[in-house]
Amino acid sequence: MSQLHPGTAAERSRLTVLSGPSGVGKSTVVARLRATHPEIWQSVSLTTRRPRPGEVAGLHYLFCDDDAFDEAVAAGELLEWAEFAGHRYGTPRAPVLERLGRGDPVLLEIELEGARQVRRAMPDALLVFLAPPSWEVLARRLTGRGTEDEVVIARRLARARIELAAAPEFDVTLENDDVHDVCERLVALIRSDEDSAPPPPDL
């Protein structure tokens, strides 16, 4: 397995974390990035959630049961992990370190707590917060999915308010008002030289 210690030049210039509240459009942005910029490697998260219609194992997520997830945590195989909406999600460590060791640009799409864990483990990673154009737009997206009941939606709205308040912890905030535009702005950040990347915030 390739070894990479936090703070190396490859990590500072290559590791980018995308986070933001549920419903803000992270998956849509990443799907466009996959289609238009295949040279940027996106980590596939491990999750205990069951596949949704259309999701492909190994492409959208690595699906597993609770026991397998527990084993991965105990073995230190996850760079970060967090629980969201009753399910756990985590980033397998080895593929990320291997890609960074090659000098490949790496993007992680993860939840707020996971982003905080990456900040602690790899302080030079660039953390990007994806924000909605307004609270009304985000609430409309969350309530218009039609996939969850009212209790789940209320819980997601409450969590979204907490997540929006965490935006100052991130290096850059991108407003998701246009998927094409925000994708290109994200790519520009990923490709930016080390010296031009914004410094980490004081936490």
Image (spheres, grey):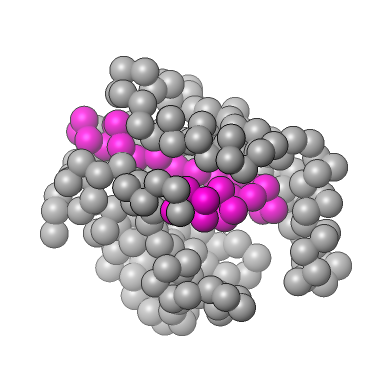
Which image quarter is the N terminus in? bottom left
Span highlighted in magenta in the image = 8-34
Q: Determine if the magenta segment contains residue 9.
A: yes
* Residue 63 image offset from top left, x and y in percent: 45, 76
| Location of residue 8 by image quarter | top left
Which residue appears at 52% of the width and 67% of the height?
A: 88
Which sits in the foreground, 27 or 115?
27
Could one spot residue 123 in this view of the protein? no
Which residue appears at 79% of the width and 36% of the height?
A: 134
* Residue 159 image offset from top left, x and y in percent: 71, 51
Could one spot residue 48 in this view of the protein? yes
Left or right, residue 136 beside residue 15: right
| Location of residue 7 by image quarter | top left
Position of 10 relative to 93 (above/below): above
Q: Determine if the magenta segment contains residue 37.
A: no
Which sits in the foreground, 120 or 144?
144
| Location of residue 85 by image quarter | bottom right
Which sits in the foreground, 171 or 73?
171
